Amino acid sequence: LGYMLEGVVEARKMLTIQEYQITWFMLAMWIPLGFEMSMLFGAVLNGAHFILRYSSSLVVSFVGTAREHGLLSNKSRLEEERKQALGVSERIIVAKSNCSHLFFGSTAVLLDRVAAKRELVPEPNAVVLDLSSVVTIDGSAEIALGKVPGHLIIGGLHKSLKIGVQQHPMLKS
């Protein structure tokens, strides 16, 4: 028990207040319930804390049309083609993720922001998601991405990530 107390006190500098409270709760539960049950309670509390904290964080760095963000194709075009491309860029919704883990909570925030923008854009051609910040994607996020209506283009995924949704070859990392 002495080593545990020493570890809890030394860990204070590395933990948030909520994480530190969970650690003390685990230590307090260890005595009456035993080590296994205190670890189980700690795992459940830490999981809930992660979900609440992560789903309320800044998941999306921007959502808008390609034209609003000045996204260009980097191709030389004739004046007429440029005007046509600008018209199309007003109907392409672009969203950039700011999170490293895509799960049901962060995906819901991302897709809610896209849906809100979609209501403002007349007849959107496509939704482009830049997921270059994403390190892991769970199954629930993949299912949610697969249900996005219309043409969805996902770019920036790390090579180690496999996802069932079509990735655009020009946007792969």
Image: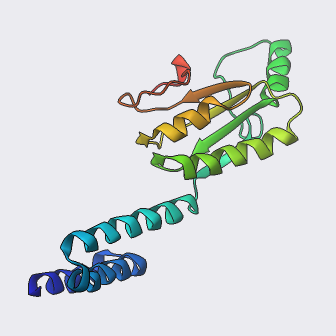
Looking at the image, residue 73 sits to the left or right of residue 17; the answer is: right
Colouring mode (rainbow / by chain / secondary structure / one colour)? rainbow
The residue depicted at 17 percent of the width and 86 percent of the height is: 5
Q: Residue furthest right?
A: 122
Q: Is residue 33 above or below residue 103?
A: below
Q: Is residue 48 above or below residue 116?
A: below
Q: Of 136 and 3, which appears nearest the observer?
A: 3
The residue depicted at 56 percent of the width and 59 percent of the height is: 55
Q: Residue furthest front?
A: 33
Can see residue 131? no
**Where residue 64 appears, x then y in whole percent?**
74, 42
Looking at the image, residue 10 sits to the left or right of residue 59; the answer is: left
**Where residue 14 appears, x then y in whole percent?**
29, 75
Q: Of 96 and 24, which appears nearest the observer?
A: 24
Q: Quadrant of residue 78?
A: top right
Quadrant of the frame with the N terminus? bottom left
The residue depicted at 66 percent of the width and 31 percent of the height is: 147
Q: Of 63 and 101, which appears nearest the observer?
A: 101
